[in-house]
Amino acid sequence: MELFQVQVTMTDLLVIAPELALTGFALVILLMSAFARPERRGFLGYTALLGVVAAMVSLYWGIGVEASAFGGMVRIDPLSFFFKAMILLICLLIVLVSLGYAKREGIGFGEYYVLILFAAVGMMLMASGVNLLIIFLGLEVMSISIYILAGIMRDDTRSVEAAFKYFLLGAFASAFLLYGIALIYASTGTLDLAGIGRVLAEQSWISGRPILITGVALLTVGFGFKLALVPFHMWTPDVYEGAPTSITAFMATGVKAAGFAAFVRVFFYALPSLQAHWTQIMWILAVATMTVGNIIALSQSNIKRMLAYSSIAHAGYILVAFVAGNELGISGILFYLLAYVFMNIGAFTVVILLGKKGEENTLIGDYAGIGYHHPLLALAMAVFMFSLAGVPPTAGFMAKFYVFSAAVKADYYWLAVIGVLNSAVAAYYYLRVLIYMYFREPEREQAIGGFSPAAVLAIIISVWGVLQMGILPSAFLALARQSIQFLL
């Protein structure tokens, strides 16, 4: 019997060098944690930090490079480079935040950091995969890690409940996605994204292929769950509230970035000939996601739940650019995601620093008087809230400006109007946090935990990112435009 031999070249290894670096450090941390005493596990977080830095260094060679690996299943190109860099930035900030928070909450064991690194590996596979099976593999690696991280606080019933809900609903979503992949394969005879695009471009009778249309619909359901699009969003507030706050920030940014990376590559690279069909669906999803997210966020008294519904609304704003589908729209997606990373992780980091073990202070009322007791922390939170609301000169304003401008250029005037109106509604619940911080007296004495220097550094980086992208956005937009040229 003839044996199949797979030859791995140096190019193959270089294309997945960041993933290999994170995997290697994850295994080292797992081994180290098995022999480290519980009271001496603080160095595991710094080892994870070193692993992220090593992955960033290994990514450096991919600047301006386009190459495929493993039989064309994985690719490094400007789009995957942009998303890999963003995912590693997210991972860096989350590990920085976790150094103090994980120790405070008693979850700073090796598995915590290992799962963060493995989740990042899955995210990067989703960003660089040009085969539907690789994208699905990356999604599952990411999802399984996040399921466990959401319930890693085993003594907290809310954390366990969050993990259980996320796992059950996520399993259904993965089944939909896999079934959609199977139907697309049945219609086109290939799982390669470029191959799917070529087959569909040669067929003028697409509307007569219900199997293909059903497959695309199921793909939309699967990706819609990961991106928390309405009506696939029901898991979001409970999971965001119950999960450890650092993991909530990781889900809100990393999962969304990886989901949109795969979403953009699949729909604009493999399914552009179906754009007339799926654009109408995305238009409806964008309006529903923006509106539902913002309206329900108005009534939230818990800041983690408020930010959860806020993340739903922001996914709707990004979908506006997705519907536009022009150069400014697709590059606007990348710009918006990067801006969202800074303002969202920054806001969650402030939430972490304003709490302590057993008393997280996640009610909006708990923020009363913070502007006087912790002025610098309140100022940082104000910057993040202004950016989330889209107030100039912050990154959030420029991100929404590019997204809505793309919709106007593509003649989706009503979609842009609905987006602007939703932004006005969202300003209410973001500015309400500022009112409590600066214009309300605390009803009780706040129990604030110690400030972790690493978390403070994460806030400084986030504030810099929000202001830099708001005041001087042209360089970031140019980078985003350069990353999507091959899609146009």
Image (cartoon, rainbow, N blue to C red):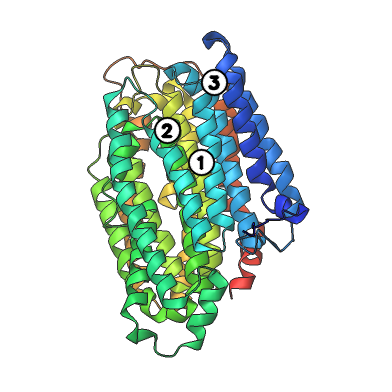
Q: Who comes first in sequence, dot 1 or dot 2? A: 1
| Residue sitting at x 59%, y 57% | 128
| Residue sitting at x 43%, y 48% | 388
As shown in the figure, which amino acid type bears the numbered disc 3?
Ser
Report which residue position mark 3 lands on.
452
Task: Report whether residue 121 is seen.
Answer: yes
> Is residue 39 positioned above or below 378 on the image?
above
Per the rendering, the mark at residue 149 is: 2
- Dot 2: element: helix
As shown in the figure, which amino acid type bears the numbered disc 1?
Ala
Q: How many marks?
A: 3
**In terms of depth relative to the viewer, which is nearer, 280 or 143?**
143
> Is residue 165 positioned above or below 267 on the image?
above
Task: Report whether residue 396 is seen.
Answer: no
| Residue sitting at x 44%, y 71% | 185
> Is residue 358 positioned above or below 321 on the image?
above
Dot 2: few (<14), some (14–19), or many (≥20) neighbours within 10 Å? many
